[in-house]
Amino acid sequence: MKRLGKHVILLSFYLRNIVQMMPGKIVERTQTGVRLEKNLLKVLKGLAEYCDITLGDLLEGIVLHAFEGKSPFSPETLAAIQHLKTVYHCDLTAGDSHRLSETAA
């Protein structure tokens, strides 16, 4: 079983490198000042680190998948997200979307 896990990790690493080497679309990126809930941002930063990509790349991927009605995450990544949510005390769900209010500064 461990041997299979090692091969899966190596295959994942190999495929990620192939994707990174393949030419993609040329885009123009812009700096933005996005405000996010503090613990949610911690989870996103942790997930970006887990996936070995930048926070911007993670957000772009999530949005592009959402625009097509697709889930951007494998079951393994969803488990990592649940762990990160626990670590960073993030109890927000999709039901909380558009219902968050800020505390007075």
Image (cartoon, helix red, strand yellow):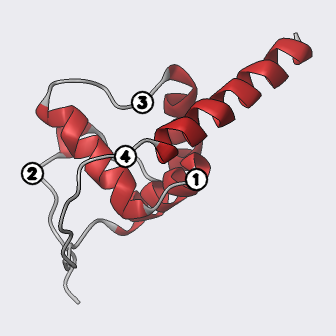
Q: Earlier in the sequence, mark 1 or mark 4?
A: 4
Image location (x, y in percent) of residue 81: 51, 40
User: Looking at the image, do the residues carrying marks 1 and 2 touch, with CB atoms under 8 Å apart?
Assistant: no
Give left or right: position of 57 versus 1: left
Q: State the SS at label 4.
A: loop
Depth order, front residue of 46/100: 46
Nearer to us of marks 1 and 4 is 4
Q: CA distance from mark 2 to mark 3?
A: 22 Å
Which class describes the residues within 10 Å of circle 3: few (<14), some (14-19), or many (20+)?
some
Whichever of callouts 4 and 3 sits on the residue coming sooner in the sequence is: 4
Residue that label 2 marks: 98
Q: Secondary structure at mark 1?
A: loop
Residue at the location (20% across, 80% down)? 33
Say which amino acid is labelled 2.
Answer: His
Q: Which three-letter amino acid code belongs to the residue tagged 3?
A: Phe
**Considering the numbered disc 3 on the image, is that residue within a helix, a strand or a loop?**
loop
Q: Is residue 102 left or right of residue 41?
A: left
Query: Closer to the camera: disc 4 or disc 3?
Result: 4
32 relative position to 93: left or right: left
- Which residue appears at 38% of the width and 51% of the height? 58
Q: Residues within 10 Å of mark 4 (few under 14, many from 20)?
A: few
Mark-to-mark CA distance, 4 and 2: 37 Å
**For this rendering, which residue is in front, 94 or 59?**
59
Q: Is residue 104 left or right of residue 55?
A: left
Disc 1 target residue: 52
**Which residue is label 4 attached to?**
23
Give how far apart the Cα atoms at labels 1 and 3 are. Answer: 14 Å
Of callouts 2 and 3, which one flags the residue occurring earlier in the amino acid sequence? 3
Q: Amino acid at mark 4?
A: Pro
Marks 1 and 2 sit apart, C-alpha to C-alpha, by 29 Å
Helix or strand or loop: what does disc 2 sit on?
Answer: loop
